Amino acid sequence: MSKKLSEIIPSNSISYIIICGGIIVIIILLGVLPFHRYNAARSNDVKSLQSQIDEQKQFQKAYQSLLGISKTEKTHKLPNPVKTKLPRMDVDKFQDIFQAEVKKSGLSTVSLIPDMKTISAGSPAILFNATTKGQFANFRELLIHLGALTYIDKVEGINIRQQQDSMEFKMKIWIALAN
């Protein structure tokens, strides 16, 4: 019963089996293993691209929310009214109007003093030295509101100083006067 392998299988067949087995091993080593490595590298590339896509989706959500905020944010159209002159009798009304504009802008008035040198009867304009306190964005609002007043000739000499709790804004406002 125990016959040798060489007696059962002829030697030519054994050599053919070894050659065919060698060819199969060579095909596996030269074809299948590199293809497996290539597929593993492509799989890593796919994972990397998928993580980039997920990141871009998160950025898209942030972009959409910022886009929505920018669309809903109120835009200011700067006023450019036709210039008029304020009658001399109504100069004291400017102080009340200025106070209202300052309050509407979210600032507080520190002082609003007319310049005595410009009060003379023949002057075409009167100068007010104004000082307000608050935040810079509110000062911007105040300048926009003042731009809508038709009798303000110009605003000059703006001085901004940082205080401990807020900013202080000093400016010179020229009011055009009618004779």
Image (cartoon, grey):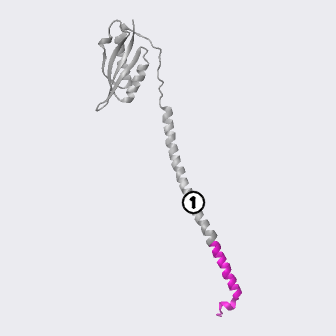
User: What percent of the width, then of the height, locates residue 21?
Assistant: 65, 79
User: What percent of the width, then of the height, locates residue 118?
Assistant: 33, 11
Which residue does the numbered mark 1 point to in the structure image?
A: 43
Query: Residue sitting at 67 percent across and 80 percent down?
Result: 19
The amino acid type, in three-letter code, at marker 1 is Ser
User: What percent of the width, then of the height, locates residue 166?
Assistant: 31, 30
Answer left or right for 127 relative to 64.
left
In the rendered image, which quarter contains the C terminus? top left
In the rendered image, which quarter contains the N terminus? bottom right
Seen from this angle, which residue lies furthest left? 164
Answer left or right for 152 relative to 42.
left
User: What percent of the width, then of the height, locates residue 98?
Assistant: 36, 18
Answer left or right for 74 relative to 162.
right
For numbered disc 1, what is the local secondary structure? helix
The number of callouts visible is 1
Q: Residues within 10 Å of mark 1 (few under 14, many from 20)?
A: few
Magenta span: 1-28
Query: Could you tell me what secondary structure mostly forms the magenta stretch?
Result: helix
Q: Nearer the viewer, residue 29 or 102?
A: 29
Query: Residue sitting at 66 percent across and 82 percent down?
Result: 18
Query: Residue sitting at 35 percent across and 11 percent down?
Result: 91
Taking the magenta stretch, the answer to whether it contains residue 18 is yes
Taking the magenta stretch, the answer to whether it contains residue 16 is yes
Q: Quadrant of residue 5?
A: bottom right
